[in-house]
């Protein structure tokens, strides 16, 4: 249903939808105001806003009075998001409401408005998703004190555990921390399990992901994709679950992870659908640099030119989030470079490494003629020659 939701968002006019609930007036370029239409808000100051971003071609909304929508994603109020589906869900969630629309139900309402057919979802797939969602609820009750202490050590608090529905269970040869994998419709479609007491001496793998099924494809999946919002024009791609969770914790949105899977053409196709500029923020080690180069090259073949955030040596994004905290967004902004800059940087480093290898190869030949240098004047000339031609100035 995720493809259908993207089609609806591209087709629906949020302004016209909201006009069905309240009177709307323009107050600037691509900005409109209204009295909040929510039944629980007696708005006297026209605190509701609608925006249209011409660059991204996305709509968003917010109420400045009851703190729902775009401007307060971390308010104490339940927040559905900023798009057309979020608006319908929010409008149905009021005191005394007999039924609050789910995300799939909001999709069906808007699909009907646009006369779009809803693809059939097999009973088998529905049963799989229901079972996985039940398992997720069960796993949350299995978190031991030790695991909670470990997660706290990694920077997570009780609110994070609840938001990401983190649990635990004995799974695939060990007791693992279970991270539910959500699809764009916010249903659980699988799990990523981390061996909670893993060490370098462990025989079992640190992470074990659900096998591919009718509802889950590892080769195209991004952890955190259910929280991608149209409010931002970029999407930050990283490696692991902690990178994503801690980035969101410190107000960096649109962060997703490949869960250690190699970046594939299926990932590229999904990035195309997002219509956002990818920013790669992989681990600052040799493996991470190679993975970054491979991924941005694959995207470039499809005409998508990525950006790259340069992390400090030895850090991953989760480490950086715990260090920078609320400054994380600014760090990413200041240390992100363009595609061509990263390619040239990588090429220059390769050239310099080869040049250093060549210098070491010719050093024995240089040492052979060193003994023929007699006078101080000759020593100066010899040293100047080495500096100019080879950058070597410590032979004599």
Image: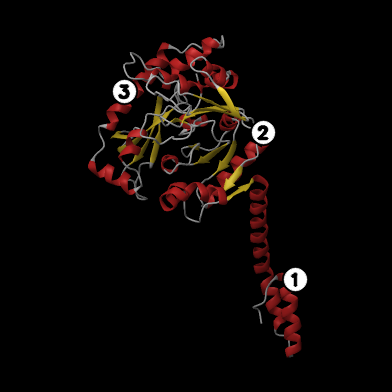
Marks 3 and 1, how far apart at CA: 70 Å
Residue at the spot x=29%, y=32% of the render? 140
Q: Secondary structure at mark 3?
A: helix
Q: Are marks 3 and 1 in contact (CB under 8 Å)?
A: no
Which residue is at 63% across, 49% downward?
342
Which is more foreground, mark 2 or mark 1? 2
- Give the x, y percent position of residue 174: 30, 38
The crowding category of the residue bearing disc 1, from other C-alpha atoms within 10 Å (few below 14, some 14 to 19, many at least 20), is: few
Residue 374 percent location from the top left of the image: 73, 89
- Closer to the chain start, of discs 2 and 1, is 2
Residue 294 lies in what quarter of the image?
top right
Residue 260 or residue 162, whichever sits in front: 162
Q: Secondary structure at mark 2?
A: loop
Check residue 302 in the rendering and tell me which mark sits there, or answer none: 2
Decide: few, some or many residues near mark 3? Use Cα within 10 Å; few <14, some 14-19, many ≥20: few
Q: Up-down: is 345 above or below 105?
A: below
**Horizontal and vertical percent position of residue 7:** 57, 19
**Relative to 208, 263 lies left or right:** right
Foreground pick, 47 / 344 = 47
The mark that comes first in sequence, 3 or 2, is 3
Residue 134 has which mark? 3
323 left or right of 279 in image: left
* Relative vertical location of residue 152 with respect to residue 358 in this rendering, above or below: above
* Precedes in sequence: disc 3 or disc 1: 3
Asked whether residue 365 appears in the rendered view, the answer is: yes
Image location (x, y in percent) of residue 201: 35, 50
Residue designated by label 1: 389
Compared across the picture, whether 329 is left or right of 201 comes to: right
């Amino acid at each position: 249903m995720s493809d259908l939701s993207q089609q609806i968002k591209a087709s629906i006019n949020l302004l016209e939808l909201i006009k069905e609930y309240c009177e709307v007036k323009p107050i600037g370029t691509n900005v409109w105001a209204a009295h909040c239409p929510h039944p629980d808000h007696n708005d006297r100051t026209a605190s509701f806003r609608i925006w249209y971003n011409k660059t991204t071609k996305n709509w968003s909304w917010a109420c400045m009075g009851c703190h729902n929508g775009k401007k307060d994603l971390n308010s104490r109020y339940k927040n559905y998001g900023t798009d057309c589906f979020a608006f319908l869900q929010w409008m149905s969630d009021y005191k005394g409401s007999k039924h609050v629309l789910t995300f799939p139900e909001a999709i069906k309402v808007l699909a009907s408005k646009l006369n779009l057919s809803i693809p059939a979802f097999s009973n088998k797939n529905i049963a799989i998703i229901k079972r996985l969602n039940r398992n997720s609820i069960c796993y949350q009750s299995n978190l031991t004190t030790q695991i909670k202490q470990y997660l706290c050590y990694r920077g997570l608090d009780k609110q994070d555990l609840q938001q990401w529905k983190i649990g635990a269970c004995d799974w695939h040869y060990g007791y693992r921390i279970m991270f539910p994998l959500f699809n764009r419709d916010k249903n659980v479609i699988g799990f990523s399990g981390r061996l909670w007491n893993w060490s370098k001496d462990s025989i079992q793998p640190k992470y074990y992901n659900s096998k591919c099924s009718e509802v889950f494809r590892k080769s195209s999946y991004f952890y955190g994709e259910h929280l991608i919002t149209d409010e931002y024009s970029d999407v930050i791609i990283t490696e692991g679950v902690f990178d994503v969770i801690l980035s969101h914790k410190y107000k960096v949105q649109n962060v997703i992870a490949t869960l250690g899977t190699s970046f594939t053409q299926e990932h590229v196709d999904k990035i195309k659908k997002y219509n956002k500029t990818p920013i790669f923020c992989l681990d600052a080690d040799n493996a991470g640099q190679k993975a970054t180069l491979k991924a941005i090259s694959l995207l470039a073949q499809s005409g998508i030119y990525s950006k790259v955030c340069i992390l400090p040596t030895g850090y991953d994004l989760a480490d950086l989030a715990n260090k920078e905290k609320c400054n994380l967004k600014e760090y990413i902004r200041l240390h992100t470079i363009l595609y061509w800059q990263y390619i040239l940087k990588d090429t220059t480093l390769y050239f310099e490494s080869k040049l250093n290898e060549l210098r070491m190869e010719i050093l024995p030949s240089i040492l052979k003629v060193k003994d023929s240098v007699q006078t101080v004047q000759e020593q100066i000339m010899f040293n100047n020659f080495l500096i100019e031609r080879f950058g070597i100035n410590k032979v004599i």
